[in-house]
Image (cartoon, grey):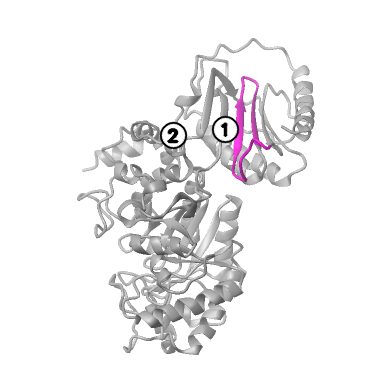
Amino acid sequence: MGKSFFTKLFLVLTVFIGLVACSEPKEPINFPETDLSAENMIPRPVKIIPTHSAFGLDQFTAIYTSPAENSFAELGEFLSREIKTHTKLNLAVNETDAGTVDRIIYINQVDSLSLGGDEAYQLYITQDSIILNSRTAEGAFRGVQTIRQLIPNTSNDTLVEHSMWPVPTGKIMDQPNFGYRGAMLDVARHFFSVEDVKKFIDLLAYYKINVLHLHLTDDQGWRIEIKSWPKLTEVGGSTEVGGEAGGFYTQADYTDIVNYAAANYMTIIPEVDMPGHTNAASVSYPFLNGNGKTPKLYEGTRVGFSTFATRKDTIYTFLDDVIREISAITPGPYFHIGGDESHVTKKEDYKYFVNRVEKIVRKYGKRMIGWDEIVIADVDSSSIAQFWHSETNAKEAVSKGMQVILSPAKKAYLDMKYDTLSKYGLNWAAYIPVDTAYVWTPERYAKGVPLENILGIEAPLWSETISNIDELEYLAFPRVIGYSELSWTIEENRDWENYRVRLANQAPFLDRMDVKYYPSDLIDWKKSKYTYEVIHKD
């Protein structure tokens, strides 16, 4: 640890000692023995060293943060709010006159070489303090989620005369296995409101997911305002699967989502699917259409019937505007062009289209992502293939020097049914129960795709069969929690029997968040009102 760490820690401890000196001496608390390594953290950290006592979180706890970093102060306020939501404790943040303070939580920016990356963090938990070290606010944010997960669901009211939440003591050293840990939400087949997306972000961030890919356009709907082409949303955004009213995000709405995600250290990836899956765009502006038929608004779920007229120069003028406007309000480095299931696009026309669109994406400073079909074109090695269907395409991506995102439909598609009794979802790829979703090895899943070419993992949720947040949560949870661990936790620390116990203990958090998760019989869920009601309904 560098000199700056000890200097900042000295300043905080000076304040802490001063506050303690002004308070009445207290009897030591006789904590029961704890085991930090047995806590229900998901994803599981790299290394856990328990010391078998406890930090007593209570009304006499205060939060301090590195003074040189305003983003760390914001994290302190965030943690204080989340603790208040959970416990009703109102912890002061960076107050020199915080009243009686017996214990502190210190969120500290360090330059330690022992921390391996921007998302790495260390936690040191003693009876008197929780010290969270990270080089970046992003890493500290991941560590804050771990602190949140370590706070007991209920207080222990027998240790002292007031409520106290004992946090097990010890040391945690942690960093992600993959830098890209994603989920995808299809808002095109069915539209989801800004508030729905924000709730999804809250839940994903708790489990250290750092990418949300938004599938913004498809045959059934165009969901993002393009100011230079207003009919895209006026016409193309007017319906959805099943014939409901649809909807769309204004650019202000989309910016709100992007900013909310950024506050949770999450990157938004916009997807405009093309040259197939483009019926909604072609209905809005018929000159775009290339399938030889008169386009009409579509409310079904069939795929592969639409295509842009890929040899028209006006198509690329249109796409230049679309990509320019979306890129301007998307600070992240990626732009997803779709590229899947373009069955009525001739092969040479498809290649020509992808090559031209890639140049437009790069023109606006973004890195192109596409579903694995894009590799048949002459794509640059800087582009990324998202493996969902064809292992051959994934291997071809590697031969071109590309990175690959793992989203194999048979393992990672959140819209697949859990089993034959599932209320929602499809089963064309597989049934994916909770154990199947977790028990696979991403590092070696795709033959011919070495670890160095794997950017990360993403779990897509297509929305043909779901139309509201409750149904979204039913398909996403608890499976997306498992994908978070597959993405973050190293292979040697992943174990189904251990994971299923930790997953069972997520029920109280999910209940507090009013998540309508699927209460799989494979999990012995910690008793909760919601789980009981669902299992015993009817």
> Magenta stretch containing residue 458, yes or no?
no
Residue 13 at what x, y percent from top left?
A: 75, 25
| Quadrant of the rendered image containing residue 102 | top right
Residue 306 numbered tag = none
From the viewer's perspective, tell me whether residue 480 is left or right of residue 73.
left
Query: Residue 338 versus residue 177: which sits nearer the camera?
Result: 177
Q: Secondary structure at mark 2?
A: helix
**Can residue 141 be seen here?**
yes
Residue 166 at what x, y percent from top left?
A: 54, 22
Residue at 39% x, 57% y is 460
* Mark 2 → mark 1, Cα distance in angstroms: 13 Å
- Please name the residue that numbered disc 2 is placed on: 493
Image position of 141 with respect to 403: above or below: above
Residue at 56% x, 11% y is 30
Of the 4 image quadrants, the one containing the N terminus is top right
Residue span colored magenta: 113-133
Of the 4 image quadrants, the one containing the C terminus is top left
Residue 173 numbered tag = 1
> Magenta stretch containing residue 118, yes or no?
yes
